[in-house]
Image (cartoon, rainbow, N blue to C red):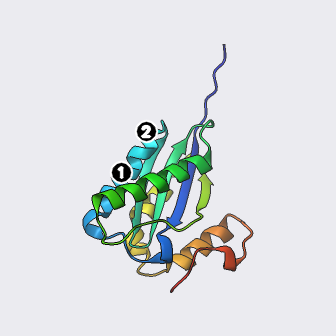
Amino acid sequence: MAGTFSQIYIQYVFAVRGRENLLQKPWRDEVFKYMSGIIKGKNQKPIIVNGVGDHVHVFAGLKPAMCIADLIRDIKNNSSNFINEQKFLKGKFSWQEGYGVFSYSHSHIDNVYQYIANQEEHHRKKTFKEEYIDFLRKFEIEFNEKYLFDWFD
């Protein structure tokens, strides 16, 4: 009997509520590792999770049975609960509603990985808003700027 073989590569981009720089360096990597664990726990393949103080990039390989929206819902819900339970912040942490999701071929894995790995350096030259709008344009996704994240830069 023939089997089904596939691998789908997805990059999620999402922001901290209010676009505040709340993901602080002392514990940011712990949150990113936790997010990778969520992805593994769903039997998917985490490739890299990284970001800066106000947003995160998650690059993962998905099996076709995994719903894109379900995975990001679980990543955001579980990681915000983790941040709050660990009391990394004085107030309540949450992610902004919405996200961007972009697909890639196998030949792009290394470039996407390097791009995500170098987020701090990248954002010395480009704001999150510029980066996000560039993604939407590159992937030819129609958008109305008033329905994007709350921008404070």
Camera sees residue 97: yes
Considering every residue shown, the one lying at the far right of the view is 142
Considering every residue shown, the one lying at the far top of the view is 1
Residue 129 rendering spot, x and y as whole percentages = 55, 78
Q: How many marks?
A: 2
Res. 34 mark:
1
Please state, as top left, top right, bottom left or bottom right, where the N terminus lies in the image. top right
Q: Is residue 51 above or below residue 64?
A: below
Q: Which badge, 2 or 1, is on the more N-terminal residue?
A: 1
Label 2 residue SS: helix
Residue drawn where x is 28% and y is 58% of the image:
86
Res. 41 mark:
2
Residue 96 rendering spot, x and y as whole percentages = 53, 68
Residue drawn where x is 39% and y is 68% of the image:
92
- Amino acid type assigned to the residue bearing label 2 in the image: Gly
Camera sees residue 110: no
